[in-house]
Image: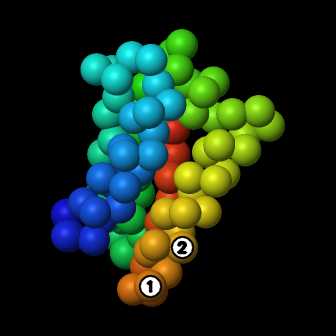
Amino acid sequence: MTEQSHDLAAMVESIVAPLVDYAEDLSVTSSEEEDGTVLIEISVNEEDAGKVIGRQGRVIKSIRTLVRAAASRSDRRVEVEILD
């Protein structure tokens, strides 16, 4: 895992942590795909999933936008997924 993918995962964790009630269940992992895309996976308690997704997906879309903007400075592709 590169330094930047770790930084992006930390950024996602710092955004998501205040949103959830069960912070001990929060897990943010990052991995690099074969094509160079950084995959960041968010795992939360099922009761917190709705807070991270938001109405009509607005919160998760905003998180994806922020992370992609941060990654674009170094010409990296990033995908942010929330796990069930």
| Residue ranking furthest to the top | 47
Give the residue drawn at x 28%, y 63%.
7
Residue 8 in the figure: left or right of residue 75: left
Are the two marked residues, 1 and 2, in contact with CB atoms closer than 8 angstroms? yes
The picture places residue 18, in percent across and down from the top left corner, at: 44, 33
Residue topped by disc 2:
69
Query: Could you tell me residue 76's position as x and y percent?
Result: 43, 79
Furthest toward the front, the residue is 18
If the image is split into quadrants, where does the N terminus sit? bottom left
Helix or strand or loop: what does disc 2 sit on?
A: helix
Question: Dot 1 surroundings within 10 Å: few (below 14), some, or many (20 or more)?
Answer: few
Q: Amino acid at mark 1?
A: Arg
Q: How far, Cα to Cα, is label 1 from label 2?
A: 7 Å
The image position of residue 44, as x and y in percent, is 43, 26
Residue 84 visible to an observer of this rendering: no
- Residue hosting label 1: 73
Q: Residue at x 50, y 31 (%)?
A: 19
